[in-house]
Amino acid sequence: MFLPATVVLWSIYLTNAAPSQPHILLIVADDYGWNDIGYHGSEIKTPTLDGLAKEGVKLENYYVQPICSPTRSQLLTGRYQIHTGLQHSIIWWSQDSGLPSDSPTIAEKLKHVGYKTHAVGKWHLGFARVKYLPTSKGFDTFYGFWGGSESYSGHISCDDLHWSHVNHSRVCGLDLRDNLAIDRSQHGHYSTHLFTEKAIDIVHKHDKTKPLFLYLPYQAPHAPMEVPKKYEDMYSNIKDVNRRIYAGMVTCMDEGIRNVTHAFKQAGLWDNTILVFTTDNGGSVKNHGSNWPLRGGKGTLFEGGVRGAAFVHGNRLAKKGYVNHELMHVSDWYLTFVNLANGNLEGTKPLDGFNLWNTISHGAKSPRTELLHNIDPLQVWGKRAFADTFDNRVSAAIRAGDWKLLTGQYEGLPESKEWGKRPEGQGHGIVGRSSGQTNKVVRASSVQKSIMLYNIRDDPEERHDVSAQHPTVVRDLLDRLKYYNQTMVPVHYPPGDVKALPNLHGGVWTHWL
């Protein structure tokens, strides 16, 4: 059978390191849809991203997690979220939760071998305690916001506490930090512009004798729908006003990336820079992102939620200007970066990622043949099919070769059971919304079960569940989920804490424990 007897968690050894350390520019877009980047045929203009991707390597079989905190945790630790306790939902503002301290982040590993490390933008990996903060996780400096979302110009974050059983009110506070200090001076400063300017300032002030790691997780194009009017006005051809705003948000981010890369060139750093661009999850359908023609979106384990737009650019690439279809995952950047930096794995817990530099740079076969999308034991639905293997009622998904198995998935939401047909000319494939034309909708059959199997190579849109035709594959993949389930640490998802409320801290979100 195609499945290995064991899973290699430590991955590929550190080999073929370059003689000098490259600068690393890691850019993350927030809730960025598969069909929202120009080179995927989008109506949205992304000339900078398109140009960089054309000169580099497009990663077309690359995966992230379906929501924010889990992707960011795996990006910075190289470990699946089942191994950090973050396998359920996101980290909410008032939760005492964050990235565990039992294994170093990629920033810490790079710092240990001489890198200057900076983060600008969205954190979303906890702030209840100082130990959760970016400056406690290996970053020399941080500028941005600690929570999951906020207004772009007012920098106000709001947390709906109904889930925490604390109360049913919506509480808001300022969330903008310069290291640990609150920054009250940027009201009215659009965050994409602000974060771009801060990143450029870091680049121009950087000591050229030191390697640079700049982590730039933009807020855009995550909700709320806000953009300076000049960017919205670029899309008069899009009739849906919210899609038009979304398009403007993406183009503004694209412009910011152009300006940051220009700063690298001005500073004389660009020729020795590796740039990685990735989304954190699929586009949010309800917030006007598009993942067409993939099924689903943010918050789902279908391809529209987890297959990410991504590419790599840099002079160190041995092979450039091509499309890579090898299997990759966001957790792979950790070991790949450590290898590029001539680092080591001292103090690191067993990793779930691989060193993929040879795969990306030379087009070699990926060492990754399997990836765990997630196991969330707090989400259970359906009827149990087998007593002697993984409980298929639990929300989970796994990919092995071309096969993908999903369990415990509720198909009751448009994001999970519908695809929008892209209208001619300017349609964006969002179910229930249109750019002047009516989207045709293909609905999945109302399947009352919690096991789905797809061959992603033959059926990348996940239209044809073939679990009934391949019972042996189903059982094999359930056994793999059982294996991973045995390695899982307990979920860490505490209730909200009223001591976190901004009105107790001068109207700001801050660490309170």
Image (spheres, grey):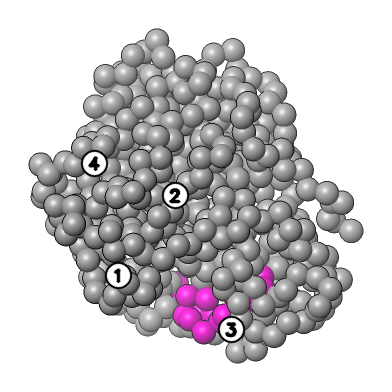
Q: Residues within 10 Å of mark 3 (few under 14, many from 20)?
A: some
Q: Residues within 10 Å of mark 2 (few under 14, many from 20)?
A: many
The amino acid type of the residue labelled 4 equals: Arg
Q: Nearer the viewer, residue 165 or 200?
A: 165
- What residue sits right under mark 1 in the picture? 160
The amino acid type of the residue labelled 1 equals: Asp
The amino acid type of the residue labelled 3 equals: Ala
Q: What is the number of the mark on residue 444?
A: 3
Residue mark closest to the camera, 1 vs 3: 1
In this rendering, is residue 166 above or below 261?
A: below
Residue positioned most to the top: 209
* Labels 2 and 1 touching (C-beta < 8 A): no
The span picked out in magenta is: 406-426
Please state, as top left, top right, bottom left or bottom right, where the N terminus lies in the image.
Answer: bottom right
* Labels 3 and 4 touching (C-beta < 8 A): no
Q: CA distance from mark 1 to mark 4?
A: 22 Å
Q: CA distance from mark 2 to mark 4?
A: 17 Å
Residue 53 visible in image: no
Assign a secondary structure to mark 2: loop
Q: Earlier in the sequence, mark 3 or mark 4?
A: 4
Residue positioned most to the right: 1
Q: CA distance from mark 2 to mark 1?
A: 19 Å
In this rendering, is residue 285 above or below 4?
A: below
Assign a secondary structure to mark 3: loop
- What residue sits right under mark 4 in the picture? 177
Q: Position of residue 31 (x, y in %)?
A: 40, 58
Q: Residues within 10 Å of mark 4 (few under 14, many from 20)?
A: some
The amino acid type of the residue labelled 2 equals: Gly
In this rendering, is residue 278 above or below 469?
A: above
Q: Earlier in the sequence, mark 2 or mark 3?
A: 2
Q: Position of residue 231 (x, y in %)?
A: 20, 54
- What residue sits right under mark 2 in the picture? 98
